[in-house]
Image (tube, rainbow, N blue to C red):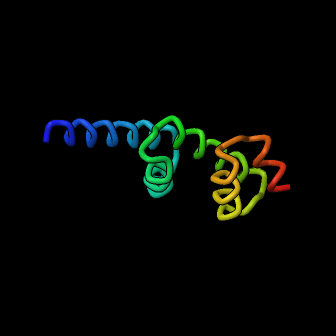
Amino acid sequence: PGCLLLQLLSYLGACDRLLKQGYEEGQVEEAMEMFQYSEKKAAEFLHLLAQFNDMGFQQNEIKEVLLLCGNQREKALEELV
């Protein structure tokens, strides 16, 4: 039971830190789930998602490409273009 509580606190802390960076709650939760609660990978994904979104790409396309490319920026950009 204590281990589960620590995992929950860790998850909530990671979500809080990502939310403070300006990401939307729904996106943060989705990214954390997609990357099995890895804050680092979720943060990379959210950063790239925002970057590519600002470039005018469609969010659904961006998500798919980032997952396929493992958050590799250059490879994902190639696929999107």
State the image quarter where residue 47 is shown.
top right
Q: Quadrant of the image for the N terminus?
A: top left
Vertical placement of residue 54 versus 7, above or below: below
Number of numbered discs present? 0
Residue 81, relative to residue 17: is it above or below?
below
- Where's the C terminus, which quadrant? bottom right
Residue 13, horizontal then vertical, whole percent:
34, 36
Q: Which residue is drawn at 70% across and 48% down?
A: 69
Q: Residue at x 72, y 63 (%)?
A: 58
In percent of the image, x 59 and y 45: which residue is there? 45
Residue 37 position by quadrant: top left
Direction from residue 23 to residue 62 in the image, left or right: right
Residue 40 pos. (x, y %) = 51, 35
- On the image, the x and y values in percent for residue 6 come to 23, 35
Question: How far across and how far down the image is residue 79, in percent?
Answer: 81, 54
Task: Answer left or right for 57 relative to 40.
Answer: right
**Which residue shows up at 64% across the image and 57% down it?**
63
Query: Which of 27/66 is in front?
Result: 66
Query: Which residue is at the front of the view, 5 or 70?
Result: 70
